[in-house]
Amino acid sequence: MSQRALWGLGALLAAWSLLLAYRSPVPSEDGVSYLWIAERFAAGDFAAALSTVFPPGYPLLLAPFVALGLDVERAAQGFGALTLAATLWPLSRLATIGGAVTACPAVLLFVASPLPSRLVAEVYSEPPYLLLMAWGAWFGCRGRMVAMGSCAALAFWIRPEGSLLAASFVLVMPRRAWPSLLPVALGVLVLAAWRQAVGHGFDPLPIHAFHEGRDDLPERGLVLHNLVALPGPWFEGLAVAGLLVLPTLRPSIAPVLRPFVWQVLLQVAVICTFVVRRRFFVSCAVAVHVLAGTVLARWPRRVQYVVLAVALAIGLVSGWNGGIDRDRAVERDLGAWLRPQLRAGERLVSDLPRVAYFAAQRPLPPRHFTAAQLLALVAAPEVAVVVLRDRSERVPFAELEPQLAPRFDRVALPAGLAEAAAVRGVAVFRRR
């Protein structure tokens, strides 16, 4: 594939991602937590930044933009668009290493993929993660195992599944690939030591302990249940490439492609031991598109055109129509309205992380809270404002509101904001 074509496709992919970012009313709920952590890193408050359950790699990459005075949300979307587009270069090399006559099918399938550009717009960590996974896989295929392991270690700091890159090569070629485990181990130890140094214990992945204590995901860890539920989210997340890759997931595949098969199998196995969500499957998008590209490249040219046209149509429709709903914009407006009303030492508690973030408050951990858990959170005397969904399926608002009444009054919002909050179903309370 010519460099000119790659540059053109990269520019189109970045532009599409930025267009979706422009249309997105707010970042995702996890996204605002990443932005808050990046701001803490930029301020030098490492203890606060490392106190959350999220891996710190992605916010660390965003922190320099905050330190330079840039708007962190726009910087994150721009950074995501560039890293996603840059993934095309190692992906094109991997496609030909994998035996495809041309890199075009794999690259075009990736460009048309329905979720990665939306993840840029919603400020998720996948774009830089995919870039590291792609370069790491290329280093592994070239026999540069320490470099591959270094990419896996860096990817681990962004998403824990990054360590599976090294594992996939070790399973296929243990004698050659074992040195890749050394930088991975070093990356894990450094992260654990850093967290311990700022007072959080020698634990590189507090998110695991956090998930173990969750009572809001009844399907967590139900492997058979998750396997049955897998097909729908798999195809939602990977679309046409997710279908094309299925014939390649077999032991008899060419040796050069076996690490990619293991990458897919290992990451799917990890997902099935937790919960199945379409976004989680994007973590193996590099391996999936390399394998899918080798399949599509063998088909007649006319069939390839039809498949790619279908993939592009799915990607465009999904990207344009599948983003965050417009009524979520009130969460930004409400947070910005509440921000100047919070006096020094006062806190806001909300089960809407975006409201907390835009009010310059720390978002709550990423989980659904019961009524008892929310009441325990708002009991602290420094909690001055509470913002809740009044239509939550998990927390019956009709039961929760009377328990807030002895200490909190419901706030009458300004006219325009009140209408938007009513549409979204948001209630605001202020301590007497």
Image: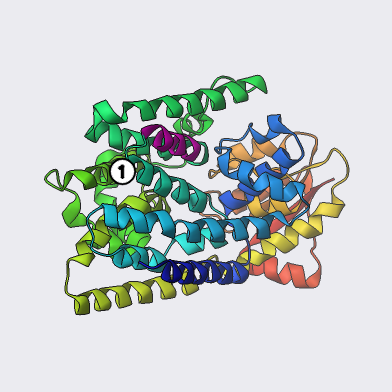
Q: Is residue 174 left or right of residue 199?
A: left
Residue where numbered disc 1 is placed: 141
User: Which quarter shows the C terminus?
Assistant: top right
427 and 332: which is toward the camera: 332
Three-letter code for the amino acid on which mark 1 is drawn: Cys
User: Which quarter shows the N terminus?
Assistant: bottom left
Q: Is residue 62 left or right of residue 249?
A: right
47 and 87: which is toward the camera: 87
Q: Is residue 105 above or below residue 158?
A: below
Q: Is residue 183 left or right of residue 261?
A: right
- Span colored in magenta: 145-155
Q: Is residue 201 above or below residue 409?
A: above
Residue 271 picture location, percent across and down: 35, 43
| One can see residue 350 in this view | no
Identified at 80% across, 55% down, the residue is 338
Q: Give the SS element for disc 1.
A: helix
Residue 21 picture location, percent across and down: 59, 66
Identified at 60% across, 56% down, the residue is 79
